[in-house]
Amino acid sequence: MHGPDIQTLNEKFGVSGRVAFREKVPGIVVARIACGGSTADISLYGAHVLSFRPSGGTETIFLSKQSHFEPGKAIRGGIPLCWPWFGPHPSDANQPLHGFLRLVDWNVEAAWSGEKTTEISLVTASNEITRARWPHEFRARLDISVGEGMSLELTTQNTDSAPWVSTGAFHPYFRVGDIAQAEVEGLDGVAYQDRLPGGKEGVQKGAVVIQAETNRIYGSGAPKTIMDRKLGRRIAIEQWGCPSTLVWNPWIERSREMVDFGDEEYLEMLCVESVRSAPDAITIEPGESASFGFSFRSADIEKGA
């Protein structure tokens, strides 16, 4: 990690019982955020949420047991940030998938606690490494709030002398008990584009169920819910500044191809992503900024529901 060491971070930003910093592996510093029995772990490398456990509940976020934890490589699972592009780079296949924010170090700008939430703000900005991938000046801030649920908002500011265009997303991996007993409600009747090879457009009928490799982007940013029958819980998701939703599960063959993902781990995860993709790309003028975010919280499924 570049910047303050663990002792300095704890002295400057630590809050007793609420905010503490530790080194997960050499070079990877993690902030533990707590409030009212809920806890979250956030890596300063990539501003990457690794865990959220609500008060009295079980882990909500999936993190692969085979994930890399080393600078220069993406963390598999958690909540990756995708920016300044979503998916493959529009013109250069050698650029990293989903941009570079999840591959850079972030600094702590502030941390504070209130009666119902504990919050932390992380910041990063353009430098020699980012300019080699994207020749623009920017500043980014991620605001994270932990309480009964969790919310994240990314604000990006154009500090350049010319406008630039960006897309982006939050790419959360939600933990489920059994993918065969999980479904996504809230997308019924929404048009989608199947992003798998040879995929076509379609319209969702009923809840989204996963029975094969799934990679669909839906034209809706409306609230939605993951119903997890195995764990007896529902995860309610809301998003803003993101007009689309992507539902992804790698299934069997794709899981075997990924070196940082277990062959059977597709059974216990489901990505429901808040997305601003290429058709909704935004232009930011010099000195201006834009924000997008999402929130989630879990609750028990009522008997009979």
Image (tube, rainbow, N blue to C red):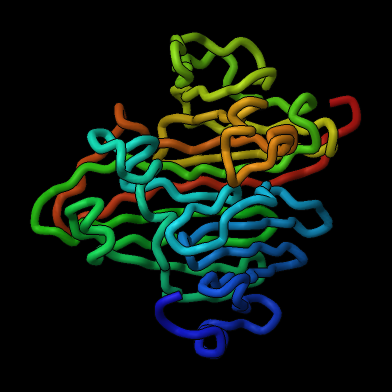
- Residue 83 spot, x, y in % from top left: 36, 47
Q: Quadrant of residue 206?
A: top right
- Residue 13 spot, x, y in % from top left: 52, 82
Q: Is residue 63 visible to us here? A: no
- Residue 221 spot, x, y in % from top left: 48, 31
Q: Is residue 169 left or right of residue 236?
A: left
Q: Is residue 210 left or right of residue 169?
A: right
Badge count: 0
Which residue is pictured at 74% across the width and 67% down the height?
36
Is residue 29 or residue 258 the one in the foreground?
Answer: 258
Q: Is residue 227 visible to us here? A: yes
Is residue 177 or residue 55 the one in the foreground?
Answer: 177
From what the image shows, is residue 219 above or below residue 256?
A: above
Is residue 279 or residue 241 the one in the foreground?
Answer: 279
From what the image shows, is residue 22 above or below residue 198?
A: below
Which residue is pictured at 84% across the width and 39% down the height?
231
Q: Is residue 114 left or right of residue 143?
A: right
Which residue is pictured at 23% across the width and 65% down the height?
128
